[in-house]
Every structure is written in structure tokens, then in C-alpha cells.
Image (tube, helix red, strand yellow):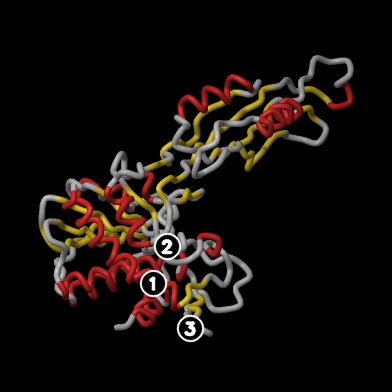
Amino acid sequence: MKAAELLQALVAIPSVSGDEGRIADTVSAWAEGWGARVQRKGHNVWFSVGSGPRRLLVNSHLDTVKPCAGWTYQPHAPDWREDRLYGLGSNDAKGCVAGMLLTARALLTEGAPTGGEVVFAFTAEEETGGQGLGTLLSELGPLDAAVVGEPTGLKPCTAQRGMLLLRCTAHGKSGHVAHVHSTPAVNAIHMAAVDISVLSELRFPSHPLLGEARAQVTQINGGLARNQVPDKCEFFVDLRTTPAMEHAEVAKQVAGVLKSEVQVHSARYLPKATGANQPIVRAAVAASGAEPVGSSTTSDWAFLGELPAVKVGPGDTLRSHQADEYLTRAELEAGAAFYTRLVRAYFEEVARG
């Protein structure tokens, strides 16, 4: 099966987060047909190629978001049109999956790099943060470095933003709107509005690859009736953090400048960065010919702890989660060749010490 056929087959299988069983079955069957010894946990599929003291994880996700409004093509009926494959997940991230599968097939056929083992893992529920890579790490065994497949235009991302969600609650005192001038009523929505204005001016140190982080209020809810002064107003704050920002300290800083009560709603997507001297970064730069960049989106890299990693793959992140998502034939073929170069370059870097 050629690269274009393989990607088309992947995109034709609906795999919205939590419903990846069929695509996991397909990937397993392909890998087994190429001679791999496949393992499975839920909708996660993994197998190894080669052996040796160094172990490199090569990972991307099988799931997609739900199709949004505005599609002019059928999301699950992919077709090549003028060297573009339109279909849900073609760009995010089945192009990466296809490239990694073709690399695995090449290594199984031509031989793995000397002195190392490549662990290919195609995982579930990346889009929802569920039963995916984060639940699989103990099954994979010790790892020395990782490649996370996401559409980056094949530019190696060595820094990734985290995500800190805060739930803020302004507490006021209820009363009748008609008597607000003569009663001690305190409007919680007005209090929240002041705090939201403070948040819009809040600044954090800039990161060399990611730039600055800014707090964004994404949801707000308050008030029980149109003629009653609200005594409570709740709003959520989304902060896409940089590796220089520690989540607990950031939450404390925000709480210190707001009058609203501040609670951490979610802090598990941690920001990530890998130093330029790491073998996986040197290998990615050599394989791509591009200098490292930063990534504003989160990914399964967030669950890899301190493991040196790069996020890189074919496609454009701006096409992700959009109607008429596509990947070009040239991007697909370049991605497959890139992952093969990257794997071999990594073990060459390790051998050089």
C-alpha cells in the first residue's frame, strides 16, 4: 500500500475520541502483516522494532474531534483532489500516523538502527485527554526520548504551552434591583467585571520560542433573575502557560490580584521544553533542516514527564479542527521520509555521544 492509499484508508475510518476501536483494529492488522508483534490496551496500539540499550518512542494519536459545521466535502469519505486529501483527521493527525506507519514498515523490512529499539505507539483520546498515552507509559517500559506526531510543517517544536484552567467566583450580596440605592446589596457580576478587566492587563514573562502568556476568560455565569442583584458570579480563566511558569505559583499570583475566589480547575497539561543539546533535538534539526520552534497547542507530550521530546509532523496546525481539513500529497510523502531520517539520526547522535 502506497502512502496516499494508506492515508486515505485511515481517514475513511471514523475515529472520534472514544470510538477508535475500528481504526485500532486496522492499524494492528497492518503492523502484524508487516511482521510486528503488536500489543493492545483499549484502543491503544503499540509495537517495537529493533533492540538495544536506547529506546525511542514514536507516537501519534488515532482519534479526531467531531466534525464541525461548514464542511463542503464528506468528513469520512476522503478523496484526493488536486493532490489534497480532504477529510476529518487528514491533517490532525492521521498524516503523522501514516508517516510513522510507513517508517515502521521500512524499519521492519530494511532493518532497525543499530543499538536501539523504536517503540511505535498509536494512541487514543488525545483530543479529550482520556484513556490514551498518559495511561500507557507503564506498559511501554523505560524510554530515553520521544517524538510526538502533530502537524507542525515538519518544523521541530521543542517547547509547548501548558494549560491552566482557573475557576473564579465573585461573591456579592443579593437584593431587589429597585432598592439597590438604599440597601447594602453588592452586585457580584460587577465585581467579576472588575476582576476580568484586571486579568486583561495581567502579563507574564515572555518565552523565547512561545512569546508571552495572557489570561483569557472563556465562560461566565451569574444571576438568578432580571430583577435581583446577583450575589454570585462564576467565570473560567484559560491560561496557556510557558515552561517558565509553574502552575501553582501562577494560580497564587492570579489569586493575589483578584477580589474573586480563585480555585484551580485543571492543571495537568504542563508546559514542556527540551534543550537544544539533547540528541533528539539535534536529530530533528538535522532531519528537517529547520531550526526549533515553539507550539501554542497542547498534545500528549504533556504526559511524558521529563522525557526529552520533540513535537513534529507533516501538515499545518492552523488547519486542525477546521471544516475541509486536508493534507497534501507532498506533505504526506515528506513526512514519511522525515520520520525515517529522524529515527536513524537519533541513534547516530546517541552513538556519537
- Does label 3 or label 2 sit earlier along the sequence? 3
- Does label 1 or label 3 sit earlier along the sequence? 3
Indicate which label's residue lies in the foreground, 3 or 2. 2
Quarter occupied by residue 283: bottom left
Q: Amino acid at mark 3?
A: Asp
Q: Assess whether mark 2 and mark 1 are in contact (beta carbons under 8 angstroms).
A: yes
Q: Amino acid at mark 1?
A: Ala
Which residue has dot 1 on it?
Answer: 334
Q: Give the distance between the C-alpha atoms of the residues marked 1 and 2, in whole angstroms.
A: 8 Å
Image point (60%, 30%), residue name: 168
Image point (51%, 60%), residue name: 317
Which residue has dot 3 on it?
Answer: 79
Question: x and y percent of residue 284 in the render?
Answer: 34, 56
Name the side, left or right, on which 3 lies relative to 236: left
Dot 1 crowding, Cα within 10 Å, few <14, some 14–19, many 20+: some
Question: x and y percent of residue 18 in the render?
Answer: 39, 59
Dot 3 crowding, Cα within 10 Å, few <14, some 14–19, many 20+: some
As helix, strand or loop, the secondary structure at mark 2 comes to: loop
Q: Quadrant of the N terminus?
A: bottom left
Task: Judge by depth and name the residue closer to the eye, 166 or 94.
Answer: 94
- Does label 1 or label 2 sit earlier along the sequence? 2
Question: x and y percent of residue 338 in the render?
Answer: 34, 66
